[in-house]
Image: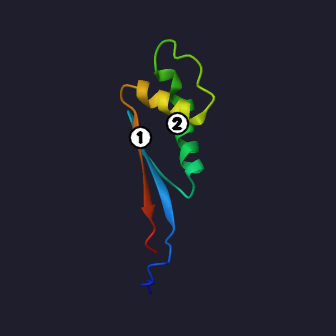
Amino acid sequence: MTSTDPSTERESVTVVTIDHRHGNTVSAHRTEAGAQRVLREHVETWWHELADEPGPVPDGPSAAIDEYFTRHPSDFYTTEVVELLD
């Protein structure tokens, strides 16, 4: 039975979709940290694709993610918070 009480909070997850040359990678995370972690792992794995001399991966997770997806010619990502219905 679904609650009709508007004060009842539903659980949500952050869905990360990474589009890349090998297809799509989709994952769901209970925390923003989990979503950032999967993006950072993608960045670290594929950083070498940025250029002949891509330089080091930035230390800060947000900086690394922003720089990678700004510079990469074909990789991009989306994040969406989705409410769990049951």
Position above or below: 57 against 40 = above
Give x and y (percent) for residue 7: 48, 78
Give me the C-alpha separation between circle 1 and circle 2. Answer: 10 Å
List the residue tagged with mark 1. 77
Give x and y (percent) for residue 8: 50, 78
Q: Amino acid at mark 1?
A: Tyr
- Disc 1 versus disc 2: nearer the observer: 1
Element type at mark 2: helix
Give x and y (percent) for residue 54: 52, 17
Residue 29, quarter of picture: bottom right
Position above or below: 3 against 58 = below
Give x and y (percent) for residue 10: 49, 71
Q: Residue at x 47, y 22 (%)?
A: 49
Q: How is the image coloured?
A: rainbow
Question: Do callouts 1 and 2 mark residues in contact (Cβ within 8 Å)?
Answer: yes
Residue 44, quarter of picture: top right
Q: Residues within 10 Å of mark 1 (few under 14, many from 20)?
A: some
Q: Residue at x 56, y 58 (%)?
A: 30
Q: Is residue 20 left or right of residue 33?
A: left
